[in-house]
């Protein structure tokens, strides 16, 4: 189906064909292509920045795969559960080519099942959530343009210059007049409407920029994840209030607004507590270990290094590669050698007494006296009786001593 989309206030008009191409009579829709493009860009960013969060890229592949599949399934299940109509068959429930993916369902599914996968693959969960939160904003910011192609996710009437109208908006609004009236909403199908897909796209992309700038300024693990919940929740709450196709809990309560409000309040409280606990501290990020099996074989003898979260990306990449190279070259005898070195150092420290404990005769010579210091008196020669072991006199002194003894005898 082709829509003739107009923006009267801007003098713009587009012809949008929802089908990108067909393979053997099977239509491939732009909706799926755009959603997939958003996911791919989000994953590219994730794999690029994984090292900055101490996450190994190889294990991240498994987590992302499980998270994406679970996210799509949960997004569809969420939409079907709250849809204002009944599906005629299971195939209709499973067919997502024409839309029907609820963002909050996808977010919940991706984080829950992705978190379980992270535990299985030994990926640090909170740093993973920080990274994925940023990536979600990329996927959502791009994915919302799939709603534009399908001419869905729009709002009530507006006289703003970017107001939009098409056969899709007209047909939908004509069919839901009674439903909107029950909700107390009046909409003229023949007038332009808010392109709320555009609002949410711009909001998400702006949030991506904000959180990306905070990567090197984060104070605790989970901060960016909470930032994502707060940022997206605030935007979704007010944008959802403009939409005419919102999923409803009842006749007056919109599902996404309720979820957004609760999640924003909870995330804000956790954010404040986290920042208070992290005050004055530097977040240290353990470097990603590529071979966990080899690390386990070292029995704790191989140290896993860390870097401050503020360290540059190149430094994380270099240090991580160097540490994993050393781990790959590690041998059991390296542990024995390091233990011997540590023992030798400890013995040397114990054998070397502190300067303050040395006997006076072994103390280091004092610094030279200053000119103003008083001269010391010449030490007196000890009496013969008090001298336990006199020094051996030289030849001349010996002769003088013998003459003195002879003179004494003569007297």
Image (tube, helix red, strand yellow):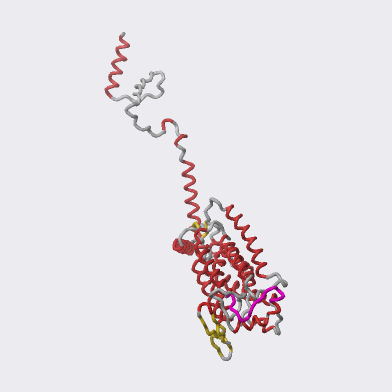
Using the image, determine if residue 167 lies above or below residue 365. Answer: below
| Residue placed most toward the observer, 290 or 402 | 290
Q: Is residue 59 visible?
A: no
| Residue placed most toward the observer, 45 or 178 | 178
Q: Quick check: 197 left or right of 348?
A: right
**Residue 175 in the image: x percent, y percent?**
67, 82
**Residue 52 in the image: x percent, y percent?**
50, 63
Residue at horizontal 66 percent and vertical 82 percent from the top: 174
Q: Is residue 174 magenta?
A: no
Residue at horizontal 32 percent and vertical 11 percent from the top: 409
Q: Quadrant of residue 119?
A: bottom right
Using the image, determine if residue 354 lies above or below residue 98. Answer: above
Q: Quick check: 74 left or right of 130?
A: right
Q: Quadrant of the C terminus?
A: top left
The residue furthest top is: 411
Q: Quadrant of the N terminus?
A: bottom right
Q: Which residues are magenta?
A: 180-194
| Residue placed most toward the observer, 238 or 390 | 238
Q: Is residue 12 visible?
A: yes
**Residue 173 in the image: x percent, y percent?**
65, 80
**Residue 82 in the image: x percent, y percent?**
69, 75
Q: Quick check: 231 left or right of 343?
A: right
The residue furthest left is: 396
């Amino acid at each position: 189906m082709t829509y003739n989309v107009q923006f009267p206030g801007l003098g713009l008009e587009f012809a949008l064909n929802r089908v990108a191409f067909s393979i053997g009579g099977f239509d491939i829709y732009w909706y799926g292509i755009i959603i997939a493009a958003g996911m791919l860009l989000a994953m590219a960013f994730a794999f690029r920045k994984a090292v900055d969060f101490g996450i190994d890229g190889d294990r991240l592949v498994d987590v992302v795969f499980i998270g994406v599949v679970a996210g799509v399934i949960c997004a569809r299940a969420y939409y079907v559960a709250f849809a204002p109509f009944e599906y005629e068959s299971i195939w209709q429930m499973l067919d997502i080519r024409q839309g029907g993916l609820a963002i909050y369902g996808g977010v919940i599914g991706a984080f829950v099942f992705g978190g379980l996968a992270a535990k299985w693959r030994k990926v640090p969960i909170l740093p993973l959530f920080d990274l994925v939160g940023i990536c979600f904003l990329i996927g959502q910011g791009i994915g919302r343009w799939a709603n534009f192609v399908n001419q869905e996710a729009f709002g009530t009437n507006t006289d703003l210059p970017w107001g939009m109208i098409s056969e899709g908006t007209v047909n939908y609004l004509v069919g839901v007049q009674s439903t909107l009236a029950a909700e107390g909403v009046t909409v003229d199908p023949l007038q332009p409407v808010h392109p709320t897909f555009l609002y949410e796209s711009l909001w998400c992309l702006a949030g991506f920029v904000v959180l990306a700038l905070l990567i090197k300024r984060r104070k605790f693990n989970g901060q960016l994840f909470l930032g994502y919940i707060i940022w997206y929740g605030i935007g979704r709450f007010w944008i959802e209030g403009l939409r005419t196709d919102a999923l409803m809990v009842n006749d007056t309560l919109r599902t996404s607004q309720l979820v957004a409000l609760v999640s924003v309040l909870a995330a804000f409280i956790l954010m404040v507590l986290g920042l208070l606990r992290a005050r004055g501290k530097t977040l240290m990020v353990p470097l990603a270990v590529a071979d966990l099996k080899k690390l386990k074989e070292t029995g704790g003898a191989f140290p896993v290094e860390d870097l401050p979260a503020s360290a540059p990306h190149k430094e994380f990449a270099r240090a991580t590669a160097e540490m994993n190279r050393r781990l790959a070259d590690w041998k059991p005898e390296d542990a024995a050698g390091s233990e011997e070195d540590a023992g030798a150092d400890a013995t040397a420290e114990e054998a070397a007494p502190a300067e303050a404990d040395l006997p006076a005769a072994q103390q280091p010579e004092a610094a030279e006296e200053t000119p103003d210091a008083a001269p010391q008196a010449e030490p007196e020669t000890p009496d013969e009786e008090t001298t336990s072991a006199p020094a051996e006199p030289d030849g001349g002194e010996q002769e003088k001593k013998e003459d003195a003894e002879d003179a004494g005898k003569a007297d």
